[in-house]
Image (cartoon, rainbow, N blue to C red):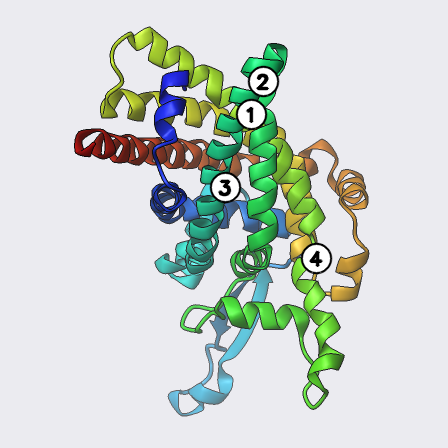
Amino acid sequence: MSQTNSNSDAQLTVPERAFSAAGAAFISAVIVNPLDVAKTRLQAQAAGVPYHEVYHRMPSFQTNTMLHNSIKCTTTPLPYKGTLDVLYKVIRQEGFTRLWRGTNASLTLAMPSVGIYMPCYDIFRNFMEEYTTQNAPNLTPYVPLVAGSLARSLACISCYPVELARTRMQAFRVTQGDKPPGIWKTLLEVINPDQGTSFLRNLHRYRFWWTGLGAQLSRDVPYSAICWSTLEPIRKKIIVLVGEEPSATTILGANFSAGFVAGTLASAATCPLDVAKTRRQIEKDPERALKMTTRTTLLEIWRDGGLRGLFTGVAPRVGRAGPSVGIVVSFYEVVKYALNHRHSTSS
């Protein structure tokens, strides 16, 4: 983004930036959620979560009058073999709408999270670029890396319990016809409060809602650093190559292309940290979850599955992240452009 564009950004208020980001997050979360479900299921399976198919068996010699008593429910292990296999089996066993399992959590998470993330990134970047340009020009190229890391940390910490709920909602399957638990019920299952005990005695259990926060930050901070330090130079070069006054179409194309490339690279590079994050978040023993660290989890994954284990679910993760980043950044920048245009015409 050029300096002129950065200056025009200053006309936008924080609520306007948050509105732009929330709209982008809404569209992205709905479109890419099936791939998020596939990625989480593959990673949860590698961590030991069993996925079985339930079917009914009836001995052939039974009569109709004995039908009710003769039917037996049995299960057979049915491991997922890849992204398409996950999507197919989820549709067949749980129903088509289960591909959007956790979408409510994704929207609950994405809208405030991205509403914090993108505006904060803009504000941090503009401030740091102005400061480094005047005082330390050699540091200006590193501004996107630092601004992205800081903004992502703030967004991650503020919305983490919903992220925990989303991962668990996507990881554990629900039989077709059964009503899946929502965000609040999922979070209550994490803390599992004792009935009949006082609120103060149960209060310490609420720290379980932040189990895995270290793993989340370990993934998201380098992800944002790689993403923004890749995205910014690519979109600047595309806009320069176009060589015309920026329009909504130019901004859309440049930002989607740059976001797609940056999201793909960043998601592939941080996949081992994403596997560790998922494994910590789906741990059902809360006391063990508190003792787990990202380092020990990565070593455990390496011991059990080697390099392949560290990159479990990389295909749906990359397939999700590229379009997701492209959609979020391009939508956000186009809405900002429209709001800036409105400010310019009204002034």
Q: Nearer the viewer, mark 3 or mark 2?
A: 2
- The residue that mark 2 highlights is 132
First in sequence: mark 3 vs mark 4: 3
Identify the residue under disc 1. 128
Residue on which disc 4 sits: 211
Residue 57 marker: none
In the structure shown, which secondary structural element does the residue marked by tag 4 occupy?
A: loop
Q: In this rendering, does residue 237 appear at all?
A: yes
Q: Where does label 3 land, which residue?
A: 117
- Tell me the quadrant of the picture where the N terminus can be found: top left
* Image coordinates for residue 28, horizontal then vertical, percent: 38, 43
Q: Secondary structure at mark 3?
A: helix
Q: Are marks 1 and 4 in contact (CB under 8 Å)?
A: no
- Residue lying farthest to the front in this orientation: 347
Contact between labelled residues 1 and 2, with CB atoms less than 8 Å apart: yes
Query: Disc 2 residue type?
Result: Thr
